[in-house]
Amino acid sequence: MLPTIAREDDVVVMIDQRKLPAQEVYVRCKSASDVARAIRTMVIRGAPAIGVAAAMGLALGMRKSSATGTQKFAAEFQKSCDLMAATRPTAVNLFWAIERMKRCFAEAAQAGQSVDQIKDRLDREAQLIHDEDVQSCRAMGAYGAEVVPADARVLTHCNAGALATAGYGTALGVIRGAVEQGKRVMVFADETRPFLQGARLTAWELVRDGIPTTVITDNMTAALMRKMPIDLVVVGADRIAANGDTANKIGTYGVAVLAREHKVPFYVAAPLSTIDMNTPDGDHIPIEERNAREVSHVGSSQLAPEGASIWNPAFDVTPHEYIAGIITERGIYRAPYIESLKAAFANPGH
Ligand code: MRU
């Protein structure tokens, strides 16, 4: 399986996703602030992977703390949490992971554990978040495979694969799950301007797995859907509001509109940690705006002239009525999402 992120004794190692597919190089983060920088600069990206990175970064930072008393140690921990929380605003998995690490810290401190014992607890919790993410992706893959026909053409947007998670992937997990069940899947990967996660990362992962993959530019989706039958669209998510509205990579909403026009079912695959029941609807999801240079340039080549204003929102929101189902590690939730998602959280065994 792809090594997206791993903890070694005194470093967090991650594959540099900015360099793929041309170069396979690894970044070794030696501190919490190194990890925060890696998240901010997209060395690692994708909602679940960002959450895992934050948890591992917090555990690493505290492991390296020289504080001997719990009070100073707690103050340093809070500072690191704030640093992580300021990296990227949209993917709720980041905040979910930070909250989980905070709970773990508080429980250990309340139980009167020493600084060294708390360090061990944080290490274990971060690894657990990592391992659970892989398990969730595999479960999502098995549930999601049900909606993939035996001979399928599937379109995806951005990269919701092993690289965007601790491993296996959400949307690509569904594709992998279907392939593991013996289904024949052809994938169409939108290139995903401006960061090109589809062309660079999704295609790289799928080609490595031997899954037939065709890369298209984002403006070819309508023509593709008109020209040949596409069986389904499956994408990941950065934050799903309580009513099912889903923030995902910019361009996802356009794909959903086209899917509806061409009667192609549009699925979202995401772990429960991506569902934010405290955000009522898509209008309340904070959307990150990134550097203009990502749009004005490709690599070092300038495309747009100096003086042109640039708008670069990293995500858009697909309204819930476009979504045929939300594939999670507990099964597929259907409309009305306001009820089905509420039930998912009210009944953890559901
Ligand atoms: O800006 P990115 O690359 O972090 O955006 C990633 C996406 O939008 C993914 O589709 C989403 O995080 C789901 S990843 C399983």
Image (cartoon, helix red, strand yellow):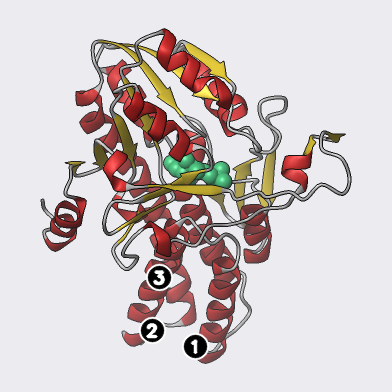
Residue at mark 3:
99
Relative to 179, 115 lies left or right: right
Residue 292: percent from the left, percent from the top? 75, 49
Q: Quadrant of residue 36?
A: bottom right
Q: Secondary structure at mark 3?
A: helix
Q: Mark 2 and mark 1: span between their CA atoms?
A: 8 Å
Whichever of labels 3 and 2 marks the residue nearer the N terminus, that label is 3
Give the vertical position of 306 relative to 324 (above or below): below
Residue at mark 2:
109
Residue at 18% in and 60% down: 345
Whichever of labels 2 and 1 marks the residue nearer the N terminus, that label is 1
Residue at 25% in and 20% down: 148
- Residue toward you, 44 or 315: 315
| Residue 119 disc label | none
Residue 56: percent from the left, percent from the top? 51, 58
Q: Residues within 10 Å of mark 2 (few under 14, many from 20)?
A: some
Residue at mark 1:
70
Give the vertical position of 78 relative to 48 (above or below): below
Relative to 289, 349 lies left or right: left
Q: Which is more foreground, mark 1 or mark 3?
A: 3
Q: Is residue 45 visible?
A: no
Q: Secondary structure at mark 1?
A: helix
